[in-house]
Amino acid sequence: MRATKASAAVTRLNARDSEYRYSLGMTASGFFYLLRAARGAAPEKISGDLTLEEFVEFANKTGPQKKVKVSKLDAAFEKQLGNAKK
């Protein structure tokens, strides 16, 4: 289960960033680290040893981020909520 959550974070990262290929490593003590490889190059370690939660957070912040699409209705609703708080 632990490795599944970490590998899912790496899969999302690979989907966002096509310039590099990311993979995860795991130490004997149960910590995770992130590896990055450019095309035709050897992988390099880009993070320290992290707990599962720290690793997932680090992987989610690494690379390009997806832009969240906001519909007109969502924007109007947010505006309405902002007016209600005042």
Image: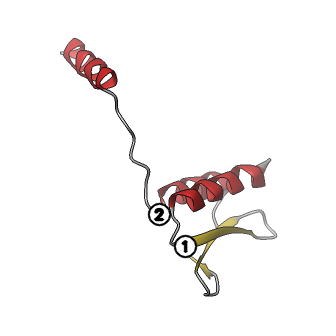
Residue holding disc 2: 63
Amino acid type indicated by mark 2 = Gly
Whether pointer 1 and pointer 2 mark residues with C-beta atoms closer than 8 Å, the reply is yes
Coloration of the structure image: secondary structure
* Residue at the outermost top position: 84
Residue holding disc 1: 20
* Residue 48 seen from this side: no
Q: Say which element carries label 2.
A: loop
Q: Say which element carries label 1.
A: strand
Label 1 or label 2, whichever lies nearer to me, is 1
The answer to whether 45 is drawn above or below residue 80 in the figure is below
The answer to whether 2 is drawn above or below residue 34 in the figure is above
Q: Residues within 10 Å of mark 2 (few under 14, many from 20)?
A: some
Which circle marks residue 71 in the picture? none
User: Which residue is rendered at x = 69% and y = 55% of the image?
Assistant: 6
Q: Residues within 10 Å of mark 1 (few under 14, many from 20)?
A: some
Report how far apart the C-alphas of labels 1 and 2 lie in the structure. Answer: 9 Å
Residue 61 left/right relative to 86: right
Which of the marked residues, 1 or 2, is nearer the chain's N terminus? 1
Q: Residue 36 appears at what percent x and percent y? A: 59, 75
Q: Residue 26 appears at what percent x and percent y? A: 75, 68
User: Which residue is rendered at x = 34% and y = 28% of the image?
Assistant: 71
* Residue 56 seen from this side: yes
Amino acid type indicated by mark 1 = Tyr
Q: Residue 33 appears at what percent x and percent y? A: 65, 69
User: Which residue is rendered at x = 61% and y = 58% of the image?
Assistant: 55
